Image (tube, rainbow, N blue to C red):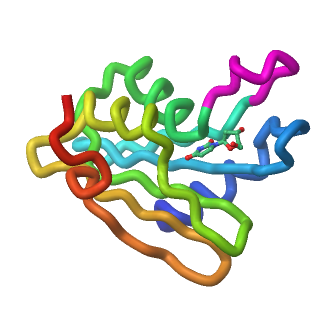
Amino acid sequence: MTLMEQARAVAKKSHSPYSHYAVGAAVRWEDETVTVGTNVENASYGLTQCAERSAVTAGVSAGLRKIIKVAIWVDDEKPATPCGACRQVLHEFSSEQGVLVQVGNPQDVIEYSLADLLPKAF
Ligand code: THU
């Protein structure tokens, strides 16, 4: 399965009864390990966790630290680029070569560098 196919598969596990917007993310780490995550909403809306941060947290919990690529899937006409908070979290674990961000939906897969999405990162 491609990284995007893994993101698409995990989006099916989304807990998004409030937004009805299921997101899947798959992160490839420097040692080629892949971790996946989905968005997890809550009745207290502000507690929502994005798919990207779920996938990053899974990898960090497995001892991984360097991300080379992330694929983000939504079944929507507009692909979802990561929110600002997720861009900053991805930056925290960027590999030396940077992070390639792939956003996909049923129509397209578009690629960005994290440096383009988060210029002048803290
Ligand atoms: N969401 C993500 O999981 N990742 C993004 O990049 C954008 C937004 C989630 C949060 C919430 O559960 C739903 O999408 C609608 O905002």
Q: Name, please, the residue furthest toward the bottom.
A: 107
- Ligand 1 in which quarter: top right
From this viewpoint, which residue is outermost toward the left?
96
For the point 40% across and 52% down, the residue is: 70
- Is 42 located above or below residue 68 in the figure? above
Percent of width and height locating residue 55 = 51, 36
Q: Position of residue 46 (x, y in %)?
A: 70, 20
Q: In the drawing, does residue 16 fall left or right of residue 83?
A: right
Q: Residue at point 87% right, 20% down?
A: 43
**Prevailing secondary structure class for the magenta stretch in the rendered image:** loop
Quadrant in the rendering for residue 40 = top right
In-front residue for pair 97/117: 117
Q: Quadrant of the C terminus?
A: top left
Query: At 42% across and 46% down in the image, what residue appears?
Result: 27
Specify whether 88 is left or right of 2. left
Q: Is residue 61 above or below residue 17?
A: above
Residue 12 place in picture, x, y as percent: 78, 51
Q: Is residue 42 magenta?
A: yes
Which quarter of the figure has residue 100? bottom left
Q: Which residues are magenta?
A: 41-49
Residue 93 relative to residue 33: left or right: left
Q: Is residue 35 above or below residue 65?
A: below
Return the x and y of residue 9 as percentages of the image width and height.
68, 56
Q: Residue furthest front?
A: 120
